């Protein structure tokens, strides 16, 4: 008998009767987003407030940090509703955070580069959930998208300020050189069993390589707007 993968799950309650593979796939995504949103807020967004050069920049950085913590809270709340243990959605759980969070933030220029490029990667990840067949996750993606776009625009706006001076542009380019090689790995391995399952159930829409290719194209275009160049990337496994 052929398995019916053309399903739509409209509520958390309905998820209980979905196939086990579907439930596990959705749980993996929720856990990943909950953990990485929290790490991003703790490692980059909150520390960046001290580096922000003006009260206006500090105000906007506080808003970014607040929204990133808010994203963690929303994904964690969804996970709890789904029956995921809370300890799996915080640091120290079984899911490792993205490798970029191993780099401690040292300068304002680094934070601007992260908002310019890393948050663009997050936009693509959220875009791929906008038509997710698990509606609670789809709705959460749609709710967070405007804030993700604001974070990326934050990166563009402050990049535009930095590149007005040779010193600012040099500092921003140095930050791009440090962080960019690790960012395309956000999208996972080329041959990913998880991604196959996500697409099988229409939880996600695109392959990791398709998303990575799109990301590199968009990132190259946005970097060029500010006279920045992207170094070689680390190849995904």
Image (tube, rainbow, N blue to C red):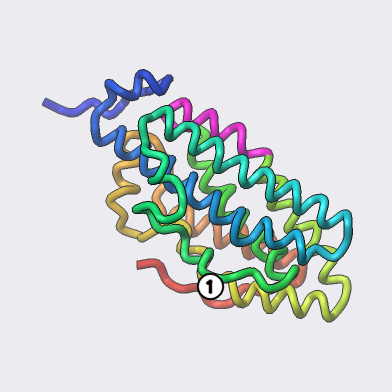
52 or 218, nearer to the observer: 52
Q: Report the residue marked by disc 1.
A: 181
Q: Quadrant of the C terminus?
A: bottom left
33 left or right of 13 in image: right
Residue visible at 43% across and 35% down? 79
Which residue is most to the left?
1
- The answer to which image quadrant residue 163 occupies is bottom right
Q: Secondary structure at mark 1?
A: helix
Instruction: Give how far across and how far down residue 81 sits, in percent.
Output: 43, 27
Side (left or right) of 38 relative to 203: right
Residue 62 located left or right of residue 209: right
Crowd band around label 1 with a 10 angstrom C-alpha radius: few (<14), some (14–19), many (20+) = some
What percent of the width, then of the height, locates residue 193?
27, 51
Residue drawn at x 65%, y 72% as measured from the top left: 176
Q: Residue at x 39, y 50 (%)?
A: 207
Circle count: 1
Prevailing secondary structure of the magenta residues: helix
Residue at 31% across / 48% down in the picture? 194
Q: Quadrant of residue 209?
A: bottom left
Percent position of residue 162, x then y: 82, 69
- Boundaries of the magenta span: 131-146
- Magenta stretch: residue 107 in it? no
Residue 7, quarter of the rendered image: top left
Quadrant placement of the N terminus: top left
Position in image of residue 230 (x %, y %): 62, 73
For this rendering, which residue is in front, 150 or 71? Answer: 71
Q: Is residue 132 magenta?
A: yes
- 197 sits left or right of 174 in the view: left
């Amino acid at each position: 008998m052929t398995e019916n993968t053309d399903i739509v799950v409209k509520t958390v309650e309905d998820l209980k009767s979905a196939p086990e593979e579907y439930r596990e796939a959705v749980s993996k995504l929720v856990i990943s987003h909950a953990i990485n949103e929290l790490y991003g807020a703790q490692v980059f967004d909150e520390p960046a407030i001290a580096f922000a050069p003006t009260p206006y920049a500090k105000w906007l950085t506080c808003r970014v940090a607040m929204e990133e913590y808010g994203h963690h809270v929303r994904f964690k709340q969804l996970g709890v509703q789904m029956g995921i243990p809370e300890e799996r959605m915080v640091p120290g759980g079984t899911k490792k955070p993205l490798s970029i969070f191993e780099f401690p933030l040292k300068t304002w220029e680094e934070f601007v580069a992260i908002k310019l490029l890393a948050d663009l990667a997050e936009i693509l990840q959220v875009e791929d959930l906008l038509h997710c067949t698990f509606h609670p996750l789809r709705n959460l993606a749609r709710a967070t998208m405007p804030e993700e776009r604001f974070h990326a625009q934050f990166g563009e706006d402050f990049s535009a300020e930095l590149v007005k001076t040779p010193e600012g542009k040099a500092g921003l380019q140095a930050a791009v050189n440090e962080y960019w090689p690790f960012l395309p790995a956000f999208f996972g391995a080329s041959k990913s069993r998880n991604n196959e399952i996500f697409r099988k159930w229409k939880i996600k829409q695109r392959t990791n390589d398709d998303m990575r290719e799109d990301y590199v194209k968009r990132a190259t275009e946005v970097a060029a707007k500010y006279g920045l160049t992207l170094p070689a990337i680390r190849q995904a496994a």
